[in-house]
Image: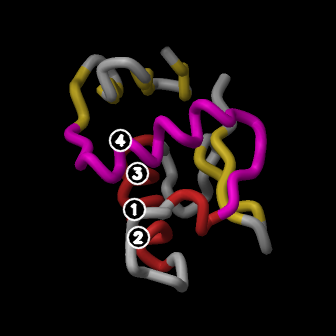
Amino acid sequence: EIKLGPAVFDMERLELMRDGKLQRLTEAEAQLLKTLAIHAHSAVERMSLSPDTADITGRAVDVQVTRLRRKLEADPKNPRYLQTVRGVGYMLAPD
């Protein structure tokens, strides 16, 4: 399990609980969060987060990150746990 403030992500079950309530994750969101959790505190390149998509720009990943931030963060516009690493991609910064 990865603790992210009021949220807990179970990497084996691919479940996100926030404030004791199960947050619905799409398969893509769950896999994205798992990949970031495996590499916690390290920047992960945007393109490596969506190897199976035809999206060569990485914008699909950006959309998934935005949706995940709404489910994870108290203030999605100023993320504490799911951070952007400019010029690289994203990083998960658990407690």
Place residue 95 in its image quadrant: top right
Residue at image mark 1: 64
Q: Which comes before the other along the chain, label 4 or label 3?
A: 4
- For label 2, the SS is helix
- For label 1, the SS is helix
Q: Amino acid at mark 2?
A: Val
Give the number of the disc on residue 30: 4
Span shown in magenta: 24-45
Q: Amino acid at mark 1?
A: Gln
**Alpha-carbon span between mark 3 and mark 1:** 6 Å
The residue drawn where x is 61% and y is 31% is: 38
Give the number of the disc on residue 63: 2
Q: Amino acid at mark 3?
A: Leu
Contact (CB < 8 A) between labels 1 and 2?
A: yes
Give the number of the disc on residue 68: 3
Magenta run includes residue 26: yes
Q: Which comes before the other along the chain, label 1 or label 4?
A: 4
- Where's residue 67, x and y in %? 36, 59
**Alpha-carbon span between mark 4 and mark 3:** 9 Å
